[in-house]
Image (cartoon, coloured by chain):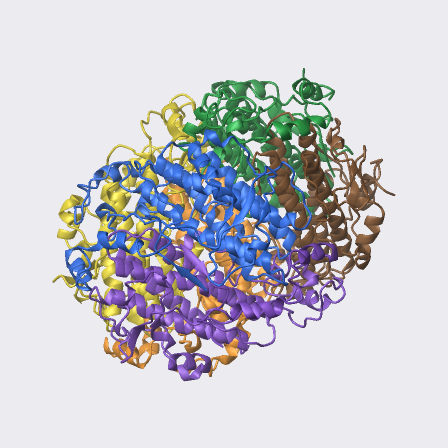
Chain colours: A yellow, B orange, C brown, D green, E purple, F blue
């Protein structure tokens, strides 16, 4: 059974919108090696798990739960990169075709016009070439060694693709999220490689994939220096045996140690997303808005509330 | 951010395996109107939500979180229906081709041979005709009224299809899960219809879809009598404003009331799934098994532990 | 612009239901070489037509219009083959799970369970293996000679597949529709081959594909004897130049002549399709039915009306 | 059975070609909520219709027939926007690579190069991201209330997307067609909402979706002022009972009335489409052209004839 | 550049036809982890290879060439299993609907009716659930370590699935081909694992996947005893450096040695496939057959010739 | 059984990189009428061939073998057009994010960002709109006449599309490969048309499709002058009867003759492809590179070796 708090696993960093960066980032969300797959693959593997290897089950499932939060983070990042793209100047109840013109004028030339026609400047479950995500991406062979190796390839590919995306744009919103995912993918590479190490495999110097001088990617370096790439968090509220695997020397064999934290990762507030009248999002006209407001006069205090909502969670970073 | 406990939202009821019932149930998991879609559609809608209609956001997202647990439940149910299909008599380290013959002998005649070739008698992210789930199923129009209406159609269709599946087999494992989902789909129909009611729409006698005399479906009747079809649970650990919508008279206009519970739904233990040597699942031979056991001698005590693990969760039903 | 009369281009012949025959016939509807493709391919080719070759345009489009009526016919035939499958004994407002049990009991073992879960025993836009129809099937190269040759291959393949389907079942409902389509596909082979003949090609004895002794297929023989395989009808209400092509000796070079008729083909009444309570189709409970009836007391007289509706069309066969 | 006249349901307005506008418009043709789906969904629903609710059948089917004419209109509009894109200066028998260079020089940079490689500057059965249309888009649940609600969501989404496309380009060819479709989608929203109103639902102020000040979209305003968004035409040559539903106050509850016209909508001439030698369309070299001409010397008089052909239809607008 | 001899890489063993076994075997041909993928993945990786690691390139490409012959073998095996299914008694120019009835009578009940409708009892580029093969299955990351690991997972999965298929039928035609592919997949597992071993990884006891007591699978045991699972053949006519990798102790660490042979594997004659009149395959009527025969009176001597053709190849096994 | 030499069937001509030309060329590789389809369609047709028409079998299969070399050529051409796009200045062990910036800076704006995210500037099995290749493209009807006509349409379409692509860019790398494929597609049109001619069909002036003044396409003219469009090569090492068909006057009826050569086409060296550090291709860091080098000190001499490797093949052009 699953639970949620309305916070993000990593902060969204503010920068200008950039629709083609948003489109590149779609690969990390809905691509064949993106977060929707990692989430679904690990959940299916854990739901269909056979046998009594609980620490292996707990490791796979524990990462799967984290991946849902990655889907949440990357979705929010894409929405942010598309928002107001490239120069927003519409307001609530603004007239479509007037204030919204700037955004819509450039929309049809973008990499994926669906961001503006099908969605309201929000993330889509597709890849960077516009192909919808497919259930055929989910690999669940049933054989433990094989599933672990498949997962290792998946994380290594996801990390390689994100390193390529990182280089495609210097936008800070893009790079903050991508850098975090690069570091976490590395931690997950370590997790599956370590699980295979418990079955005897020695990885020597093959990992992580790809290897690079992190000082060239400052946002990544900062996270690595903080150890984000060697930690695993506990999102299981009833405990987990994954620590039996995720501990000791990292299978990258670089002198680092794996650390399983008892706590979930700290969380961060979600920046509010404004309405976009030119997209009819959310599409309430004054009459309907009045009815919505009548629900509980929640309107004026909402932004404040949203920030406050993020607040009560004791794990949230101030 | 998401969390998990290793329990199910509804109990798995024991009965004989039934591979073609498992295949029919795949529609409820990976079909165009199945639980993978409801889960993804509501998560995308909530992650991309625009504007300050927090109660609407909380309602959509709250249901989306529950749907992840539905995916978990239906996946486990399908695995169970496939397990040992139709007569299991293999043991750990049994010789494939010997003990496993009975299962494999009938495998190629089944509705979807992938259950036995691609997976190890586990659920797949596909529908009842074997088509993989597609990201194109996810509808997130951005317009609030439109998204709510789309969600209402989605829940109504899901419920209609599950009522049809219910009639296809008298298997208790199938019916227990399907009956629960029929009742919950009805609650979700109520939720989205009520949200539209707050914007002025009066549904008269049109809901729920389909209407039927529940006394004909005893498993459903029992859940309806217990009020499962008018409750909404709170899976948000930091509170939620969805109660502002999900309260008062049900939009079915049948005299019932909607109730938002402060607590998540109680949870139930997960029955262990045995290894299947003829599927090479999990595939550890004695040498690898020894290494796995060495992790922490967890082997002998595991079944007991799994049951105990389900125990510590205070929300779990004894 | 398109118009319609509520009649069929060929009569539905009565026989027992046969779900697996219905499934085989899906190939003729939603398969890569089925009627949905012929309809869409010729419509796209005619809408995108370039240049002043009006007789070629009129020929392609004229066949395209007829294909819509083929889609209508084959859809009705599939629904009929699925209806009451295999022994219907439910009535209006019957209780699902009771009277409907017979149908649903066998539903999950059928070739495509979608006929019973997703549809209400009706035709689906899919092929005989359950794959949804795809826009990629539509070939519109823009080059006239190439489009004509592609169309010839399309009709020849459609005819070959239908000849194979004919042999798969002796069900009269199936065979009557398939035999008609075999004869019409042959007429369309002649049409596109003749258009190429006007550009110089001599087909010698290569056509039609496949060639067979029609006396072995009695339903086909009867239609061939009546000349159905050498006629082209006029569904254009404002005239057409296709006759400039579709005339003279048939390109099968078998001594037959092509005839363009000024009139559309005669039409036939549509047999009514009963409600299926176990499918919740149409799903009106007594309260909603009363509202629907109140529209105009149309209920009691409806079957009579449906037959009468088919009547007023002067082209309809008595 | 279906019939045709070689005219359009709305005039094509002349303007410069605009390939990226053509690509955006593909969403309205081959997108998940485009005209190919509305056409196919309503045809399948009417072909598979169960029970005796003739007015509902006639309404669904009547709209379905109109949608074929929408597919025709939007296809022609896309071809027009692509034609000569961006500056045409080739003539019949011109040498590819010479006169055609301007078009082909920019072709590979366009949103969807298929418009120039696969088609000959004509419309394709794909969406704005290049995905082919899929049969899985067609929803035909069999349950009447559910099908009507699904159709209402479909029309509302189609209309929302077209309003977004309208804002993306000020090209008059695009806007004339899109404005017409926006008005007609609104009429169809009214139709399905009214059908649900006959079953008791009161829509209050929720419709149409989206609501906007039409005076901001001058082409739409003009059509609304003429009542195009509250009319339903009769494309059934043998009469129809849809008027029993499509009458009385509009479910938008804005004081307007629904009007069912006995006649089809007036029709408009189809502008001729020139050959494109650089696309080998139609691809007749002088030898083959001579053979084609010999068919009936139709060549010199053709443009005149095409305009004349559009003429004889008494419903055609002069 | 590629060359061919008209022989098979392994003999087809004679047994009764078995259409559902043929369908299961489709997974090994057109499945996500089947031979079409291995062939295409290794060819793409070798065509796109970067850098100067020639032995790695030669290894990947060498296996890719062999996989084309695997596609040939498995295709022939499926055709054989479908041929005359289940009891063939038609002859050349037999009348469809007469002699062919037995085959066609059971065709519509088979797992995939496409084998009889779309193909003429021949293999299809689809998987065991009828899904067409997709280019998205081909993984070519560009990174050498990653590509090698992906290939190892691919071979291990292919082998696991084939071991499952082996158990599904005792048909000798199926088992002979599957056993050969199990042994070769193991050799290819060794190849990619060894390539990774040259970069430092020690696989301990993890390979091959799956491990089993081969004496339980007699057809596999025989091949293993002959060393087929530790050999690599040379299909490069201009030499290859793959031997620099494929030599020394096997990475299964079971005391076996890897051997690169200078020669291609011996080859075997292709059994002739009879015409199937009920499928119109090849579809020549007496007139066309006469023309075909006139080509060179090849007819009477053909079967003899086919066997003789297989003869001249000196590598062919007598 | 298949064999290979490490050479190309046509030389790669040097020019600047051009990513959008590379993307257009993807249609010729992974498009519905591209080389992956011709290769697979002819291989499936020959593997599933029925009856004793050996010359027809040998013709279809002979062309199929050549198509594998076309896939190789077009893949290499695309990689070349993407390489260093648009200005390469990275070296081995260069730091990603530094030297590689130029390439990555423009990557996300390209037609298909997958060329840079999913692949390492290499060809993909997709079309020019980014859709993955599908097994449904392969047509193998089983009927000989029908298969030959389908193949003729396939070659004619492939040639038409390549003629369009030729006009889209003046890049010499693109044009050299496309011109060669245009000439070869014409030879294959002749082959299938001639096979149909042996069955009686007279093509008059309809072929080839499209017809054009080749002097306008200088690269094509040069190949036609050399007779490349009327030759068929022998890639069968054990002889072939295809010459019985591919001889005599060409079915284009233009006075040319068809010539079957006993030898394969001459072959050409493969230009080396440098590593791309910004793509982590091949991704060996100094430690791993040292291990790879230790294999056999092959490093320093490699470029020389690669050229030398191309040399020993006596068929290779100097």
Whole-percent x and y of residue C265? 80, 39
Whole-percent x and y of residue A197? 23, 69
Closer to the camera, D175 or E218? E218
Q: Within the image, what quadrant is residue F297 found in? A: bottom left
Specify whether B280 is left or right of A314: right
Whole-percent x and y of residue F13? 34, 40
Is residue B128 shown above or below D273?
below
Q: Within the image, what quadrant is residue D226 found in? A: top right
Is residue D39 shown above or below E219?
above
Residue at 64% in and 42% down: C151
Is residue B160 shown above or below E33?
above
Whole-percent x and y of residue E283? 68, 57
Specify whether B17 is left or right of C15: left
Specify whether C93 is left or right of B31: right
- Residue A220 in view (yes/no): yes
Image quarter where the N terminus of chain C lies is top right
Closer to the camera, C21 or C184? C184
Image quarter where the C terminus of chain C lies is top right
- Residue F129 in view (yes/no): no
Closer to the camera, A311 or D3? D3
Residue at the limit of the structure toward the right, as seen here: C318
Is residue A258 shown above or below F76?
below
Number of labelled discs? 0
């Amino acid at each position: 059974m699953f639970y949620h708090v309305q916070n993000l696993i990593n902060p969204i960093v503010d920068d200008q919108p950039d629709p083609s960066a948003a489109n590149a980032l779609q690969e990390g969300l809905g691509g064949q090696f993106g977060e929707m797959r990692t989430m679904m693959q690990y959940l299916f593997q854990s739901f269909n798990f056979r046998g009594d290897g609980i620490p292996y089950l707990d490791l796979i499932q524990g990462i799967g739960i984290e991946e849902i939060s990655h889907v949440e983070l990357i979705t929010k990042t894409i929405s942010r990169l598309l928002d107001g793209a490239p120069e927003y100047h519409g307001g609530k109840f603004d007239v479509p075709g007037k204030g919204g013109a700037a955004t819509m004028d450039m929309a049809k030339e973008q990499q994926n016009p669906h961001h503006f026609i099908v969605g309201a400047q929000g993330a889509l479950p597709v890849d960077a070439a516009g192909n919808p995500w497919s259930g055929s991406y989910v690999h669940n062979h049933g054989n433990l060694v094989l599933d672990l190796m498949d997962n290792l390839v998946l994380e290594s590919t996801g990390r390689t693709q994100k390193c390529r995306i990182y280089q495609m744009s210097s936008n800070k919103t893009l790079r903050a999220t991508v850098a975090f995912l690069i570091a976490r993918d590395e931690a997950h590479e370590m997790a599956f490689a370590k699980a295979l190490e418990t079955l005897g495999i020695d990885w020597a110097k093959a990992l992580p994939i790809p290897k690079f001088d992190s000082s060239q990617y400052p946002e990544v370096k900062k996270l690595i220096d903080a150890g984000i790439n060697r930690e695993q968090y506990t999102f299981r509220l009833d405990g987990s045996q994954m620590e039996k695997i995720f501990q000791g020397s990292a299978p990258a064999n670089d002198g680092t140690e794996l650390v399983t934290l008892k706590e979930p990762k700290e969380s961060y507030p979600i920046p509010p997303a404004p309405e976009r009248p030119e997209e009819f999002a959310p599409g309430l006209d004054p009459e309907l808005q009045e009815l919505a407001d009548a629900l509980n006069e929640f309107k004026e205090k909402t932004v404040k509330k949203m920030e406050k909502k993020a607040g009560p969670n004791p794990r949230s970073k101030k």
